[in-house]
Image (cartoon, rainbow, N blue to C red):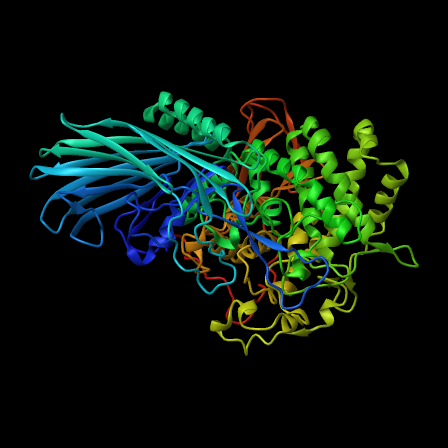
Amino acid sequence: MISHPAYGVEPWCLCESELNLDMLAQSESLFALANGHVGWRGNLDEGEPHGLPGTYLNGVYELHPLPYAEAGYGYPASGQSIINVTNGKIIRLLVDDEPFDLRYGRLDSHERVLDFRTGVLHRRVQWTSPAGSTVRISSSRLVSFTQRAVAAIAYEVEALGTPLRVVLQSELVANEQLPKPGGDPRSAAALESPLVAEENFACGGRLRLIHRTARSGLRVAAAADHVVQGPDGTAMSSESADDLSRVTLTAQLLPGQKLRVEKFVTHGWSSTRSLPALHDQVDAALAAATSTTWDGLHAEQRDYLSEFWAGADVQVEGDPEIQQAVRFALFHVLQAGARVEERAIPAKGLTGPGYDGHCFWDTETFVLPVLTYTAPGAAAQALGWRCATLPPAQERARQLGLAGAAFPWRTINGAECSSYWPAGTAAFHINADIADAVLRYVAATGDDTFERETGLPLLVETARLWRALGHHDKDGNYHLHGVTGPDEYSALSDDNTYTNLMAQQNLEGAAGAVARHPRESGLLGVSDEESIAWRDAAARMTVPYDKTLGMHEQSAGSTGHQRWDFLATGPGEYPLMLHFPYFDLYRKQVLKQADLVLAMHLRGDAFTRQAKAVAFSYYDALTVRDSSLSACTQAVLAAETGHLELAYDYLGEAAMMDLSDLRHNTRDGLHIAALAGTWTALVAGFGGMRHHDGLLSFAPRLPPALSRLTFTVLIRGRRLRVEITPTAVTYSLPAGSPLGIQHHGVALEVTPGVPRSEPVPAAPPEQPVPVQPAGRRPVRRCRGV
């Protein structure tokens, strides 16, 4: 999408220089603003035209029945879908009695700019009505990082050429009419009029609407207030009804005169608080916002992001598109997680209703690593939500006849709501993914309180599931049978390597945490015998290996399956899951996404360099990347195994996933995990960063197109800056205590204030470049962009 001439390549912003109605829905996702609690899609201020209206509150959903042709034990009874809550973005404009509508009259200019440094979306429009009246409209909006419930808009209209009368209608609107959902089953289920009115209010510039959901029993509230600046005679009135609360401003403008309104909007919800309590909550947040003022909110936003970028920015020299894309990615990952405060991070963040607003394993495996090293407080809050949802996960395990906790494949409130049982039941690796995120966070931060209060219960209950799920064979080897790994084109496999290795780490990590916190472990009922059993299972964990091929297998016996006929598969038949039965996919060698390759990234300590090279080449030829999660992982292993140009191509695919709308579903919201993968491909791929057993290591090496890569990671409260050129790397710490790291396998210490430069070793002898399935090679990036 960014290749469209309306979109420029800028290092610190996303700029749209003209309005293209055919791409309106995609742009609404790209220009979305959020803070992890509130999400506003980038709809136009006046509400129409739109692609998909969207205002979201993290955790607010409605239940709907899940129909089954045949019932089965353990199937979830109902699904959960994120809903479009009360919209406070709308400011309608009438110019001499004609609605300002970009589909009519003459659009002289239209520009939108999303500034990553200030977190503000700016819009500037000049429009001439069908009657010949010309106005200039300027607006700015933000969703506050510092005041969690608050969003705000500054909207200004100026008369050009002739005097004119303008009317502004600033609204809160509930139960907006939504477009019909598309045919893609991954899109959200549209729920019509999900909100039942409980209270409406309008007085002067103050507005309020309170509703509840009919089935899930959640109460949602929105309030707004206005600060108005206009010529003498500017009039204000207000009105309200069940689903609409409105302030109307009327003014006569001479040429050059302006009418400006600053609109402050607050959102809140609760499953337990009373109507008066929620009423008071949004009113109190509104009082804080108005006292801060628009300029104050803007300054807070800028300061917050300045601190974030100081510890998170990635600088790329040699490819301006990638430079813009990684900052776009980091900004949206931060928006998805900054203020989740013990809520989930959905796969689409709060940018759209795709995947029904559900949280998957993507969060722990792809998003939390980025947040752990750039905004660790957000990672801790997301894991706090997992800990808070232990009770339904424990209940799910009991339902399945297992011990411990079985975390859901997809959910909003913590209960499983996947109607597809090979994933919803058998994808147990989500447990190990959560444990991996816990262990990484503790290693990166040294947060003992978190480990004791949040991490320990998660590690214990996930370890208990692996001990109940697996078994020792007659030779004492430990097996996990009938599971579904990350690759969703393989299901119910025995000894999936990714699952087994991640479960091994989970078991060892749980035993280690128990030893460090004996009192709290005793309260969780962990005995010495149980901890010893975890260590024994981990030590005897089976890792499938094909001796004939001399390589690790994705799952036991999987290399013996028939290979998919890629040459007979046309380009219009991807993604395969929409054109072929799962039965056919499951019994053949074809991968939706990296599986064993992901294991070699996250558990690289379990493989030799040669084993990685052989397995990567084999599985790259089978991976069709029907998932947006795959390219970043393939970039990491391509870089590690010496295929730097291939890694660069995979980086491009991950980075441009939404900016170029590669999956043709950006309209439903951004792919937050793929965006996070842009950082991963650069930092873990070309930076070679790994963090195993508490040791932070780097093995940097750049592709020919890049002349410099610089990034910062937060480690134990210190900011480690890594600057890589084709021949050398410099590690530096501005402050704090010395830090021990590894550089290409050699231990060294970085002292604060004393940059440490090391040479980049020559690349190993070039190996044959892995091939990809016919027609599925990543797009070659232009060299020396």
Task: Establish if 585 lies above or below 305.
Answer: below
Which residue, as the protein is rendered here, is positioned at the far bottom? 568
Q: Is residue 557 left or right of residue 759?
A: right
Judge by depth and name the residue closer to the eye, 273 or 323: 273
Residue 755 in the image: x percent, y percent?
A: 55, 28
**Who's the residue at 79% across and 51% down the image?**
402
Q: Nearer the viewer, residue 156 or 538?
A: 156
Find residue 463 and report its horizontal and vertical position in percent.
78, 44
Height in image: 180 above or below 267? below
**Residue toward you, 580 or 566:** 580
The image quadrant that residue 450 belongs to is: top right
Identify the residue at horizontal 63%, vertical 45% (top origin).
414
Question: Where residue 12 sits: x, y (%)?
Answer: 37, 39
Query: Is residue 339 among the parts visible in the rendering?
Result: yes
What residue occupies the far right of the structure in this picture? 474
Against 223, residue 588 (above or below) is below
Name the foreground residue: 143 vs 312.
143
User: In terms of image quadrants, where is residue 510?
Assistant: top right
Q: Position of residue 53 (x, y in %)?
A: 38, 49
Quadrant into which the N terminus falls: bottom left
Total marks placed: 0
Q: Is residue 146 visible?
A: no
* For residue 383, side relative to residue 233 (left or right): right
